[in-house]
Structure formats: C-alpha cells, structure tokens
Amino acid sequence: TQLLEQSPQFLSIQEGENLTVYCNSSSVFSSLQWYRQEPGEGPVLLVTVVTGGEVKKLKRLTFQFGDARKDSSLHITAAQPGDTGLYLCARNTGNQFYFGTGTSLTVIP
Amino acid sequence: DAGITQSPRHKVTETGTPVTLRCHQTENHRYMYWYRQDPGHGLRLIHYSYGVKDTDKGEVSDGYSVSRSKTEDFLLTLESATSSQTSVYFCAIRSAAGATDTQYFGPGTRLTVL
C-alpha cells in the first residue's frame, strides 16, 4: 500500500496562532511534496523535500522531512486567513503519485 | 501556471449516459494524469498517460477509459455514468523526471450524475 496518513483531518484556528500538520507513512519516501488547494481550484505545489532531516522554509511555512524519510510536517507561524485551504502531502513511486487525504485548515480573522 | 485547461468545468448528466472530459496542455509535457477527488478520500488516480497512445491504469480505473491521440490532449470517458462517479475530476501534468518531479493541476471539472 502507498497509504499516506495526514493529521489532523480538520483544523480551525484564530488568526495569529501557530499550527503543525503531519503526514505519515509506514514506508520510506524518496521524496515528498506538499500542496495547498483552495476551494474550487486544483492543488498547487508548495515544496518538495528529498533528504532525510531536511528543513525548508517558505515565508511563514516550515516543512520538515523526517530523518527516516517516513514522515513530514508542515508548521505555520502566525496563521493568516489567506492560509485557509486543504493541505495535501504526496509521494511518487515510479510513474504514479499518491496523495494523503489532506488537512482542511480554516483560519478565522 | 502550466497551461492546463479542462472542459467542461461543470456538467450534470443522467445515469447511463456517456460523458467525456477533456484536458488540454500547452507545454508539451509527456505525462498526463486524471484524478478524482472525493471527501474523505483525497485525490485518487484514475488513469495516466506517458505518451501519445500510451496509457495505464491507476487506483480507481473501473468504469473509466482514456485516450491520448495528441500530446496536448488527454480525454477521460465514462462510458455509462453512474451516481458513484459524481466527483470533482482533476487533470495534471508531470513536470520532470526523477526524485523531485512534481505535478501541476488543472482547475477541475465538477461532474454530477443524477
């Protein structure tokens, strides 16, 4: 199985709060992608992580790849209403991509 | 923006009718994908193509067929639509080969089968 488990499934927070969402698997990834999807649109790539222990920052978003390359996290500092959306992690195996079920984030002004 | 368009954007049809969704890309990418997205299931791969007339099945291919007669167009056909195929359908392209290749998605087609 290529199952990617994301948690939490839903998250509602106030503007300015910090949050972390997780993506876990029982198998090792060669790489992992994070996407954000806004209502009515397709997912948009945020970042790709490749190396175990890797940390990448994208403004207020910090992405970490686990040392064993079986898990990843996304931390958002001082969340803004514009961060609202569905956050998806994904991995590719050969020609196919597998997506987690996502974390739906709502940031309340 | 990877130059991906989908048509139609919305469609309502009746059970048992054939439906064809079109994905069009302008950047000559070799790989194209069709996914469906349903609450609680995330994005699931239906079929993909790795070149003109070269296609393969994904995780949820039953009830769907695809065709790719030109590099720029990838068609998804529901031969006889069922209510379980009510979903949002996304087309995607693959940007590069190797461990860091990623996908770019079209805007989606919302299909309702009554």
Image (cartoon, helix red, strand yellow):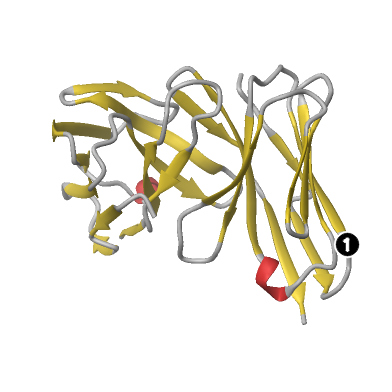
Q: Residues within 10 Å of mark 1 (few under 14, many from 20)?
A: some
For the point 36% across and 52% down, the residue is B106
Give percent across and percent down for residue B77. 21, 41
Q: How many marks?
A: 1
Q: Is residue B78 visible?
A: no
Residue type at tag 1: Asn
Quarter that holds the N terminus of chain A: top right
Residue closest to the far right? A17
Label 1: chain? A
Q: Nearer the viewer, residue A2 or A87?
A: A87
Q: Is residue B13 visible?
A: yes
Q: Which residue is mark 1?
A: A18
For the point 51% across and 52% down, the residue is A43
For the point 67% across and 32% down, the residue is A4
| Looking at the image, residue B114 lies above or below residue A54 | below
| Looking at the image, residue A1 lies above or below residue B114 | above
Name the quadrant containing residue A26. Answer: top right
| Looking at the image, residue B102 lies above or below residue B15 | above
Question: Quick check: B19 left or right of A43?
Answer: left
For the point 86% across and 73% down, the residue is A16
Residue closest to the far bottom? A109
Give percent across and percent down for residue A17. 88, 68
Question: Quick check: B46 left or right of A88?
Answer: left
Quarter that holds the C terminus of chain A: bottom right
Give percent across and percent down for residue B70. 12, 35
Give percent across and percent down for residue A98. 54, 31
Q: Secondary structure at mark 1?
A: loop
Q: Nearer the viewer, residue B70 or B86?
A: B70
Q: Nearer the viewer, residue B57 or B80?
A: B57
Question: Quick check: A79 left or right of B92?
Answer: right
